[in-house]
C-alpha cells in the first residue's frame, strides 16, 4: 500500500506541476531562446541619433529648450537669460527649469541678449553617454569623451 501511495503522490505532484507550468513547462528539454539584451537601445524615430535612453531623454530636453528659446526670441527680440524665463514658451514648463540634473546628465544654460549656450554633460562619459552642446544656431553638437562646445562636431 505504501508503494501505491507514493505512486499516487508522484502522479499528483506531476499533474499539479503540469497545471501550474503548462504543457511546455514539463516537456521543455531545450533552453528557451535568450531575450534581447536589456541594454540595447531601440531608436525612438527614424534616424534617431541617440545611443541610449539617457541620451534620448537629454536630446529631447535640449530640443525643447531650443524651440522655447526660438519662440522667446520671436516675442522679445532677445534670448532668455535663464531656463526659468523660458517657462511657458513652447512646451517648456517651470518644472523643467527647476532641476539642472536630468537623469544621467547635468544641464547648464547661460543666456544673454544676443546668444545662449546650452550644455548637457553626463555624470560618466561613455559611448552611450556623450556630451552635448547647442547655441542660438540651433544645432546640437556632440563629444564622446569631453564636454561639447561650439567647435564640436554636429550631431547626426
Image: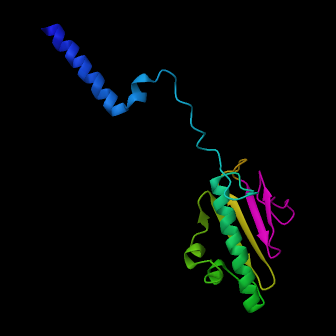
Magenta span of residues? 130-156
Q: Residue 31 location in percent, x, y?
A: 52, 25
Q: Residue at x 87, y 63 (%)?
A: 151
Quarter of the rendering occupied by the C terminus: bottom right
Q: Residue 154 location in percent, x, y?
A: 84, 61
Quarter of the rendering occupied by the N terminus: top left
User: In the current view of this chain or complex, which residue is farthest to the right?
Assistant: 151
Q: Residue 116 location in percent, x, y?
A: 77, 77
Q: Residue 50 location in percent, x, y?
A: 71, 55
Viewed as shown, does residue 137 lie left or right of 17? right
Quarter of the image holding residue 149? bottom right
100 or 10, which is in the foreground? Answer: 10
Quarter of the image holding residue 39? top right
Give the main secondary structure, helix, strand or loop, of the magenta stretch: loop
User: In the current view of this chain or complex, which residue is farthest to the left?
Assistant: 1
User: In the current view of this chain or complex, which residue is farthest to the front?
Assistant: 23
User: In the current view of this chain or complex, which residue is farthest to the bottom?
Assistant: 76
Residue 32 is one of the magenta-drawn residues: no
Residue 149 is one of the magenta-drawn residues: yes
Viewed as shown, does residue 137 lie left or right of 49? right
Q: According to the image, what is the colour scheme of the structure?
A: rainbow
Quarter of the image holding residue 148? bottom right
31 or 63, which is in the foreground? Answer: 31
Q: Residue at x 67, y 57 (%)?
A: 55
Q: On screen, 104 above or below 60?
A: above
How many numbered dots are placed on residues in this image?
0
Viewed as shown, does residue 87 lie left or right of 62? left
Amino acid at each position: 500500500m505504501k508503494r501505491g501511495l507514493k505512486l499516487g503522490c508522484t502522479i499528483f505532484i506531476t499533474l499539479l506541476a503540469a497545471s501550474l507550468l503548462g504543457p511546455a513547462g514539463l516537456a521543455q528539454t531545450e533552453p528557451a531562446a535568450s531575450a534581447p539584451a536589456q541594454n540595447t537601445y531601440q531608436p525612438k524615430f527614424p534616424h534617431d541619433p541617440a545611443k541610449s535612453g539617457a541620451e534620448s531623454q537629454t536630446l529631447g530636453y535640449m530640443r525643447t529648450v531650443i524651440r522655447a528659446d526660438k519662440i522667446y526670441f520671436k516675442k522679445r527680440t532677445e534670448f532668455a537669460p535663464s531656463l526659468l524665463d523660458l517657462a511657458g514658451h513652447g512646451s517648456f514648463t517651470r518644472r523643467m527649469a527647476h532641476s539642472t540634473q536630468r537623469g544621467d546628465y547635468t544641464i547648464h544654460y547661460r543666456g544673454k541678449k544676443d546668444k545662449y549656450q546650452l550644455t548637457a554633460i553626463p555624470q560618466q562619459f561613455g559611448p552611450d553617454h556623450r556630451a552635448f552642446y547647442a547655441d542660438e544656431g540651433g544645432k546640437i553638437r556632440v563629444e564622446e569623451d569631453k564636454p561639447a562646445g561650439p567647435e564640436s562636431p554636429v550631431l547626426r
